[in-house]
């Protein structure tokens, strides 16, 4: 997570993970802008391949924001604590808690991440153990993690966040997640389909394994959530059917911002598999 090592413990309220953040926040702003969904305690951003994804509105829908899914692309959820106190955050993807893979009700008794005051953490995947995650990746719904482990549900395609204030702590003995308690997944990461496959409905897959160490803290969450923030992801065709403008302009703006066209293309006779796509003027493939 590009963060200091954090600590994990068991309390009377929940099993929680402390994330030492990589940066300090000191901002205030509207509830929503093109890159952040803002709450009273926590702000949420979705990053696709490391770049902030545009957050989109549907006509007549003020209770959620939308993100365009692109099959085979890895994504991450950024959580930013706006407050001067610690905050607990339950994060559910496709209806499952990203820490233990259980069906999430976004309540105070679930396993949750904990952010220190004004800290930011990037959640890159399903937590496999204390040291690793399996990356979030957009795949077709039938090949999502939830579907592959028999836990598909009515929340497929949703990213939901609930934040909780801390109650006075009753100290308890720390406990490390065992292999039986950690989020289990399929035997191997799911690869993306061919770029020109017909669009269906997206889900979040069990991507590649990557190092992302955490450690322990005690945290007793208050019973009621401070924030409930909901994002929905769909392929471009579904977004257009919902009346959402998802033109290429924002995507191209971010490519320019991040210099994705700024590298030197190799000569044609020295290209390897990773270099395919330069002849199309793009540094990556894009499923549309």
Image (cartoon, rainbow, N blue to C red):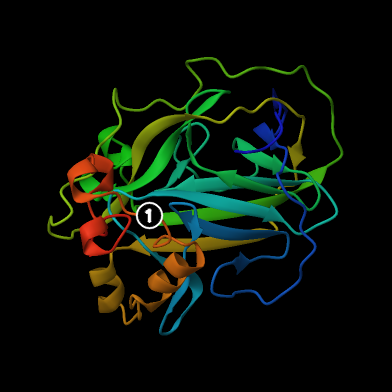
Q: Inspect this view and state whether residue 259 appears.
A: yes
At mark 1, the secondary structure is: loop
Residue 197 vs 242, above or below: the answer is above
Q: Mark 1 Cα within 10 Å, few/some/many (few <14, many 20+)? A: few
The x, y position of residue 252, in whole percent, is: 39, 72
- Is 242 on the left or on the right of 217, as rendered? left
Displayed quadrant of residue 281: bottom left
Residue 49 vs 130, above or below: the answer is below
Q: Nearer the viewer, residue 158 or 288?
A: 288
Which quadrant: the C terminus?
A: bottom left
Q: Residue at x 27, y 53 (%)?
A: 71
Q: Nearer the viewer, residue 66 or 190?
A: 190
- Is 11 on the left or on the right of 67, as rendered? right
The x, y position of residue 5, in whole percent, is: 70, 28
- Is 161 on the left or on the right of 4, as rendered? left
Which residue corresponds to mark 1? Answer: 264
Q: Nearer the viewer, residue 25 or 260?
A: 260
The x, y position of residue 118, in whole percent, is: 78, 53
Q: Nearer the viewer, residue 46 or 107?
A: 46
């Amino acid at each position: 997570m590009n963060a200091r090592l954090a600590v994990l413990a068991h309390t009377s309220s929940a099993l929680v993970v402390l994330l030492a953040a990589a940066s300090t926040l000191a901002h205030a702003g509207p509830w929503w802008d093109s890159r952040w969904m803002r709450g009273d305690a926590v702000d949420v951003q979705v990053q696709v391949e490391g770049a902030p994804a545009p957050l989109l509105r549907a006509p007549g829908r003020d209770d959620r924001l939308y993100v365009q899914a692109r099959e085979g692309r890895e994504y991450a959820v950024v959580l930013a604590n706006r407050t001067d106190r610690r905050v607990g955050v339950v994060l559910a993807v496709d209806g499952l808690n990203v820490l233990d893979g259980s069906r999430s009700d976004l309540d105070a008794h679930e396993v949750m991440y904990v952010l220190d005051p004004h800290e930011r953490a990037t959640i890159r995947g399903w937590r496999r153990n204390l040291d690793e995650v399996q990356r979030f990746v957009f795949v077709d719904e039938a090949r999502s993690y939830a579907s592959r482990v028999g836990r598909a549900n009515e929340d497929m395609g949703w990213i939901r966040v609930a934040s909780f204030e801390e109650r006075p702590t009753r100290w308890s003995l720390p406990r490390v997640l065992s292999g039986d308690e950690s989020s289990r997944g399929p035997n191997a990461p799911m690869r993306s389909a061919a770029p020109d496959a017909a669009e269906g409905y997206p889900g979040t897959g069990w991507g590649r394994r990557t190092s992302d160490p955490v450690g322990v803290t005690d945290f007793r969450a208050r019973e009621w959530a401070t924030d409930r923030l909901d994002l929905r992801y769909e392929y471009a065709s579904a977004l257009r059917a919902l009346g959402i403008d998802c033109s290429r302009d924002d995507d191209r703006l971010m490519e320019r911002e991040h210099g994705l066209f700024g590298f030197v293309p190799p000569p044609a006779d020295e290209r390897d598999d990773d270099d395919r796509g330069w002849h199309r003027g793009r540094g990556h493939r894009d499923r549309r």
